[in-house]
Structures are given as structure tokens and as C-alpha cells.
């Protein structure tokens, strides 16, 4: 094969590799659109409050649900879907993928998929952001897009609503995917379990920015911009 052919083959292979084993972190767009994502729910108190707020401001979001909670709150899962939000898989028991044996990983994915059916999109977020090459390949078998983030506000640490609002406001850039939690499954800071400060911050930011930003689901974000996928292989945070 001539060097020119080899080069063109590699040019073709790299984007294909990114598509197959890369992890979505944002999209490239000049449009003022952001995907807010909420992990670890659904929660019987906090999730409905977030849904009310999103509806009030005509905003859509993506909820990466833990299957165990989804199975217990089927009505909430249905409400999230009915209100136009996207639902993704976050495993059944919030297991860190790198430390979990492969057979258990697959069982976790299947069980969560069943729990969010028929509303689940083909989206997965690894608990604690932990991923290995092997676990990424499991998701490829499932036909899932792995979605991580490029914006976050450390909402697992207790902060004032004002501090959270400031940080959330700073994450609004075209095409960003922002990590938030409607519940903390493995809280390290017990004071952060209460989601009220985050909900107050969200209310302030949505009210202030709804005229200049559109809040969309991850699938809609991917239709608007060019998906940016990166190698994301790291231990669970
Ligand atoms: Zn999580």
C-alpha cells in the first residue's frame, strides 16, 4: 500500500475509532444550547421539583437514572419522559465499572435498561465517571452512546445557592454538557445530600438565562452540533 493510501486510511480510522470507543463530552456548535444532565435519581422529592422548574422555564434535560430507583418510582420515570426529557442508563446499583467484573457489569446494564424501559434512550453515563477500555466495549455491544461531560459544579460538596448559581452560570457555553445530580447516591459530604441549594441555584440560572440559552436533551444537542468524542479511560472518581 502506498504511503498516501496508508495516510488516508488512518485519517478514516481515527474518527471511526472515536465514534466506536470515544465518549461524548460536548458538541461543536455556535448556537446557544446547553444540555443539563441529572444523575443518580429519580428521587421522590427532588426530581419532581426539578421537573416543575424545567417545565416553568420551557427547558429540557437528560436524567441518567439508577435502575434500582427507577424500578421503585415508575410513575416518575414516566413523568420525566412525558415532559420531553431524555432518560439514560446509569447502572442498576451505581457500580464503578472499572472495579466490577464483566459479568456483573453486563447484568447491571441489562437490569437498568429494563427498569427505564420503554422510556430509556441509548445513552449511558458511567458511575463516578469511571471507565476502562473493556467497559467501554461492553457499551458498544449494547449500542449505547457513552455520555460524560465538560462542565460541572462540584454539586457533591455542600455550597450556598449563590455559589452554585455562579458556577452553573459559568458553565453555559454553546454545546456544553453539564453534570448535575438530582440525588447523591454515594454522598461523601453528608451536608450535600439536601438538593435544595442546587434547586434554588437552578431556578435562578434558568430565570436569568432562559432568554439567551436553550436547554436541550443530549439527543437534541447531538442533532444541533457535531458530537465531540474523546478517549475517556479513568478510574472511578
Ligand atoms: Zn452517579
Image: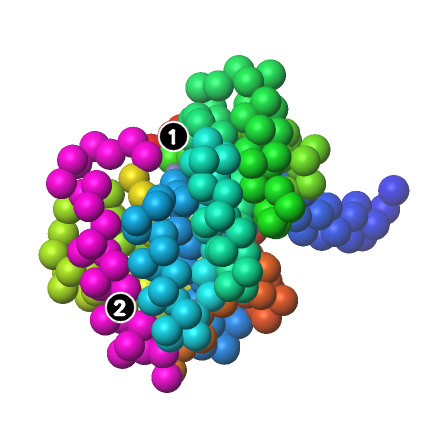
Residue 135 placement (x, y as % from top left): 56, 28
User: On the rendering, which quadrant does ligand 1 occupy?
Assistant: top left
- In this figure, which residue is indicated by the disc labeled 2? 203
Point 71% across, 47% down: residue:
16
Prevalent SS, magenta region? helix
- In this figure, which residue is indicated by the disc labeled 1? 236
Residue that sits furthest to the bottom in the current view: 211
Identify which residue, 175 or 16, lies in the foreground: 175
Q: Is residue 188 left or right of residue 135?
A: left
Point 25% across, 59% down: residue:
199
Identify which residue, 93 or 144, lies in the foreground: 93
Q: Which residues are magenta?
A: 185-211
Q: Dot 2 lies on which element?
A: helix
Residue 37 placement (x, y as % from top left): 42, 54
Q: Nearer the viewer, mark 1 or mark 2?
A: 2
Please, is residue 208 above or below residue 75 in the view? below
Residue 106 placement (x, y as % from top left): 60, 24
Please, is residue 98 above or below residue 215 in the view? above
Quadrant hosting residue 224: bottom right
Identify which residue, 208 or 138, lies in the foreground: 208
Res 218 seen here? no
Tell me the quarter of the image containing the N terminus.
top right
Residue 197 within the segment the image draws in magenta: yes
Crowd rating for badge 1 (residues with CA inside 10 Å; few <14, some 14–19, many 20+): some
Amino acid at each position: 500500500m502506498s504511503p498516501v493510501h496508508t495516510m488516508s486510511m488512518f485519517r478514516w480510522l481515527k474518527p471511526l475509532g472515536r465514534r466506536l470507543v470515544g465518549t461524548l463530552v460536548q458538541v461543536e456548535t455556535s448556537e446557544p444550547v446547553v444540555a443539563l444532565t441529572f444523575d443518580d435519581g429519580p428521587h421522590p422529592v427532588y426530581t419532581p421539583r426539578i421537573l416543575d422548574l424545567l417545565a416553568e422555564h420551557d427547558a429540557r434535560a437528560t436524567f441518567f437514572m439508577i435502575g434500582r430507583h427507577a424500578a421503585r418510582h415508575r410513575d416518575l420515570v414516566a413523568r420525566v419522559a412525558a415532559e420531553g426529557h431524555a432518560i439514560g442508563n446509569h447502572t442498576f446499583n451505581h457500580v464503578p465499572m472499572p472495579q466490577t467484573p464483566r459479568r456483573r457489569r453486563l447484568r447491571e446494564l441489562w437490569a437498568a435498561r429494563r427498569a427505564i424501559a420503554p422510556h430509556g434512550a441509548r445513552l449511558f453515563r458511567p458511575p463516578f465517571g469511571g471507565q476502562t477500555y473493556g467497559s467501554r466495549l461492553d457499551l458498544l455491544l449494547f449500542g449505547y452512546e457513552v455520555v460524560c461531560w465538560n462542565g460541572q459544579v462540584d454539586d457533591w460538596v455542600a455550597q450556598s445557592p449563590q455559589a452554585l448559581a455562579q458556577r452553573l452560570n459559568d458553565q453555559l457555553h454553546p454545546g456544553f454538557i453539564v453534570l448535575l445530580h438530582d440525588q447523591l447516591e454515594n454522598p461523601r459530604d453528608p451536608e450535600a445530600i439536601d438538593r435544595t441549594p442546587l434547586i434554588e441555584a437552578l431556578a435562578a440560572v434558568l430565570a436569568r438565562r432562559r432568554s439567551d440559552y436553550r436547554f436541550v436533551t443530549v439527543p437534541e444537542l447531538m442533532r444541533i452540533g457535531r458530537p465531540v468524542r474523546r478517549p475517556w479511560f479513568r478510574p472511578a472518581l
